[in-house]
Image: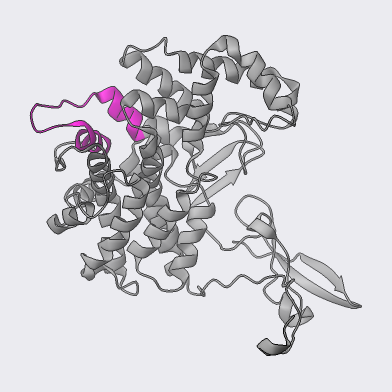
Amino acid sequence: MTASTKTAKLELNGKTVDLPVKAGTIGPDVIDIGALYKETKSFTFDPGFTSTAACESQITYIDGDEGILLHRGYPIEQLAEHGDFLETCYLLLYGELPNAAQRRKFDHNITYHTMVHEQMALLFRGFRRDAHPMAVMVAVVGAMSAFYHDSTDINDPRQREVASHRMIAKLPTIAAMAYKYHIGQPFVYPQNNLSYAANFLRMCFAVPCEDYVVNPILARAMDRIFILHADHEQNASTSTVRLAGSSGANPFACISAGIACLWGPAHGGANEAALKMLTEIGRPENIPSFIEKVKDKNSNVRLMGFGHRVYKNYDPRAKIMQQTAHEVLHELGVDNDPLLQVAHDLEKVALSDDYFISRKLYPNVDFYSGIILRAMGFPTSMFTVLFALARTVGWISQWKEMIEEPNQRIGRPRQLYTGPARRDYVAMTKRT
């Protein structure tokens, strides 16, 4: 943040208050209202915090109007094309891309933390077979604090780092265990000679009775999906992690809170909703009638996978995901997948129709990711789990940044109270 000489003037009840204006590296200025209540005895009202900067951060920058997503200044397109997920993890955590020695050490730390405590397997057996994998994830990640007592002291930098590495390393193992339990297959242990994404795919799809060879095209696609979901600024789940962390809660509890928030269909379930929409359309020739229903205000039919709360332009992640979808389907020999054809044709219609253009309904990252995950063999119940796995590094980086902020305080939003004014208790005999 840079110093600014600008101020904003607020006039209220005949009193003028000067509010400092702060400037970031890039992006809009922010008006500092920290002293507003002291000066005016008034709060601001901003449901959903859509016009409020709740923190100062150096991690991720989004320009929704221009379709820009930067991690520590690096465009997401470059990270997805030239790097891999663990390199992106290092960048988010430490602020710079690693040199060769740093990369080897970080890879080793993550790889040799992938196993979970053997007694954690007992946790899974406590769930019903039909338990949703996200319910399992919330519980098991939260329970990590009961197994790893040596990394819960948030005031110890070394313990914070160990906890961070543990979660990046163990979330794929826990996610794979949730999947295996869900489908009734035995757990598969991690293998240290595989890459992060390849190891995850093996833990999900290998079985003890035969050898499993990871397809490098699918492993690269999985790695790219992880990169594209690694962090996305101050979204609902990230804000949840920060708010939970502001109370001094241990890091495992904070990430569990983030997973719970991500479970909401308005946040982490968008790719599942987009896949369901494409399935309901079924064939390209059904697109015109579907589009008419979308335009009909009385139909309650929505175009899923298009538009974004932040992006008012083409989501930069969607272009990468589209290319990845073609690579995966070609590798698996399902280039003629009707869902992909529906997605491709629907995208062309939406990008050329004034109705959607005027509303800035461009494809987002969820539009193609569901197709990819389905082609790989994941059920829709696992889609949000994979999102949580990838987003864990973003949550941890945001949590770490918040903990290390010298002026960090517990989160305490205010409210506009609209309930009854003060009134006196009425005895039961006098109530009507």
Q: Quadrant of the C terminus?
A: bottom right
**304 up-or-down from 181: above or below:** above
In the rendering, at what x and y percent does residue 146 appear? 24, 67
Say if the magenta span includes residue 346. no
Counting every numbered tag in the picture gives 0
Q: Residue furthest left?
A: 209
- Taken as a whole, is the magenta stretch helix, strand or loop? helix
Query: Which one is in front, 374 or 231?
Result: 374
Q: How is the image coloured?
A: one colour
Task: Identify the residue shown where x is 62% and y is 62%.
Answer: 2
- Residue 314 is left or right of residue 176, and the answer is right
- Residue 159 is left or right of residue 403, and the answer is left
In the rendering, at what x and y percent does residue 330 appear? 36, 13
Q: Residue furthest right?
A: 14
Task: Identify the residue shown where x is 65% and y is 14%.
Answer: 288
In the rendering, at what x and y percent does residue 324 appear? 41, 24
Residue 150 in which image quadrant: bottom left
**29 up-or-down from 331: above or below:** below
User: Magenta region: which residues?
Assistant: 196-223
- Residue 230 is left or right of residue 8, and the answer is left
Q: Quadrant of the N terminus?
A: bottom right
Task: Identify the residue shown where x is 22% and y is 39%.
Answer: 180
In the rendering, at what x and y percent does residue 44 appear? 73, 68
Query: Which one is in front, 391 or 204?
Result: 204
Task: Identify the residue shown where x is 31% and y is 16%.
Answer: 332
